Each structure stands twice: as C-alpha cells, then as structure tokens.
C-alpha cells in the first residue's frame, strides 16, 4: 500500500495509525498525528486504518525553556 509519511513516499502493509507509529519506533504518547490534513485524536490511533493514498504527518513534541 502506498502512503505518504511526513512528505515522503512509503510502501507499507495495511496498518492502523498506532501500528504504523510502533513500526517506526515512535512513542504515540509523544506525537500528534495529522491524517489527510486533519488532526487525529490519540484515542482514534488504534482503530483508524490507513488506506491507499493516505497522507500522515507526525509531529514530535519538544520541550524547552
């Protein structure tokens, strides 16, 4: 399946958003995900299946001071 992750083309097996984050080694508690230009609530990650042509943006939170 072809999707776009942070502007880069990717070929993945059909996954949920949560499974995709886990495969990328990303802690879902520390990121926000935008799916097809809409922010996805964290509670929806496990039940949202990625589909052919989807575009996801993964934004990492950075602390500072």
Image (spheres, rainbow, N blue to C red):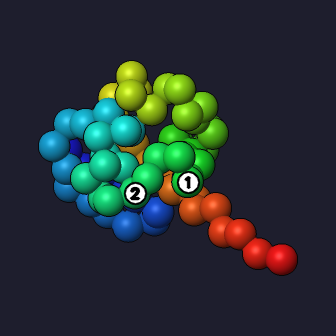
Nearer the observer, 62 or 45:
62
x 47%, y 47%: residue: 28
Q: Badge 2: how crowded within 10 Å, few (<14), some, or many (20+)?
A: some
Badge 2 marks a residue whose secondary structure is loop
Residue sitting at x 53%, y 46%: 29
Relative to 20, say whether 4 is above or below: below
In the picture, measured across the screen, residue 14 lies left or right of residue 35, that is left
- Viewer-closest of 32 and 6: 32
The percent coordinates of residue 9 (x first, y second) are 32, 63
Q: Quadrant of the N terminus?
A: top left
Mark 1, secondary structure of its residue: helix
Residue 3 - label: none
**Residue 26 in the image, given as x and y percentages of width and height:** 40, 57
Q: Give the vertical position of 48 relative to 13 (above or below).
A: above
Badge 1 vs badge 2, beta-carbon distance below 8 Å: yes
| Residue 9 higher or lower than 34, as above or below | below
Identity of the residue furthest to the bottom in this view: 65
- Residue highlighted by disc 1: 30
Image-based side of 32 in relation to 9, left or right: right
Residue found farthest to the right: 65
In the picture as drawn, the residue positioned furthest to the front comes out as 65
> Is residue 52 positioned above or below 58 on the image?
above
Q: Residue at x 45, y 32 (%)?
A: 45
Residue that protrudes farthest toward the left in the picture: 13
* Quadrant of the image containing the C terminus: bottom right
**Residue 24 rendering spot, x and y as whole percentages:** 30, 58
* Quarter occupied by residue 30: bottom right
* Relative image position of residue 54 (x, y in whole percent): 39, 42
Measure the C-alpha gap from mark 1 to mark 2.
8 Å
Residue labelled with disc 2: 26
Instruction: Please state which of residues 64 and 55 is positioned toward the viewer in this rendering.
Output: 64
Badge 1 crowding class, 10 Å Cα cut-off, few under 14, some 14 to 19, many 20 or more, is few
């Amino acid at each position: 399946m072809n999707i776009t992750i942070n502007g880069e083309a990717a070929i993945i097996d059909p996954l949920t958003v949560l499974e995709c984050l886990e495969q990328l080694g990303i802690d879902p508690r520390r990121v926000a995900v935008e799916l097809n230009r809409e922010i996805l609530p964290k509670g929806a990650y496990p039940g949202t299946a990625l589909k052919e042509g989807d575009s996801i943006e993964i934004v990492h939170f950075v602390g500072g001071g």
